[in-house]
């Protein structure tokens, strides 16, 4: 296994998600009142050439703030407007293709999302879905 990939994977698998962490260290930024309610780690099958398969680690946070307020928060944090995800939700994709962070903002009422197995807090107006996709460089 590629040593740099091992290092990235080890960091991704063991990272904590502290509020207000520093962007320089690629740690997660959270709005002040975000509360984690769900998470998961998914591993893909190894590549045909023996390289390890991709890993996706995601966390879902609830917020009592509106989706628009959360989008404004992240636009300010990242210094750029949100892109648009395949489902039309605002999102930011950060980092290289083999270690991609995704911040996606959804109304708490959104159906069929990754966190469907978890209970969204009744007070939530917004779900902040943060994931990291890790794969061997060049995959």
Image (tube, rainbow, N blue to C red):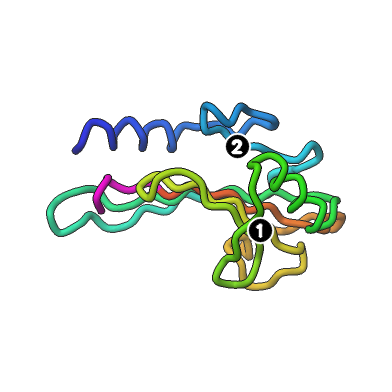
Q: Which residue is mark 1?
A: 118
Compared to residue 20, the image places residue 132 above or below, namely below
Residue 3 on image: x %, y %: 23, 31
In the image, taking residue 130 as reference, residue 37 lies left or right, namely right
Which mark is on residue 132? none
User: Residue 118: x percent and y percent?
Assistant: 66, 58
Estimate the x, y position of residue 2 in percent, counting from the top left. Answer: 20, 36
Quarter where residue 119 is shown: bottom right
| Mark closer to the chain start, 2 or 1 | 2
Task: Give whichever of 59, 117 is nearer the camera.
Answer: 59
Give the residues drawn in magenta, as a range.
Answer: 134-139
Q: Could you say which quadrant of the image residue 12 lies in?
A: top left
The image quadrant where one finds the N terminus is top left
Q: Is residue 22 left or right of residue 41?
A: right
32 and 45: which is toward the camera? 32
Residue 30 lies, with reference to residue 122, above or below; the image says above
- Looking at this rendering, what residue extends furthest in the left direction? 49
Quickly name the residue at label 2: 28
Q: Nearer the viewer, mark 2 or mark 1?
A: 2
């Amino acid at each position: 296994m590629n040593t740099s990939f091992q290092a990235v994977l080890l960091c991704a698998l063991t990272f904590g998600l502290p509020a207000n962490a520093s962007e320089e260290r690629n740690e997660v930024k959270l709005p002040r009142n975000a509360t984690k309610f769900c998470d998961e780690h998914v591993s893909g099958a190894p590549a045909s050439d023996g390289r390890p398969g991709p890993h996706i680690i995601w966390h879902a946070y609830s917020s009592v703030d509106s989706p628009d307020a959360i989008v404004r928060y992240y636009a300010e944090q990242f210094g750029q407007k949100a892109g648009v995800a395949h489902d039309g939700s605002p999102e930011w994709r950060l980092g290289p293709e083999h270690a991609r962070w995704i911040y996606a903002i959804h109304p708490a009422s959104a159906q069929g999302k990754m966190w469907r197995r978890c209970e969204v807090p009744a007070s939530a107006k917004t779900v902040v879905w943060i994931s990291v996709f890790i794969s061997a460089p060049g995959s």
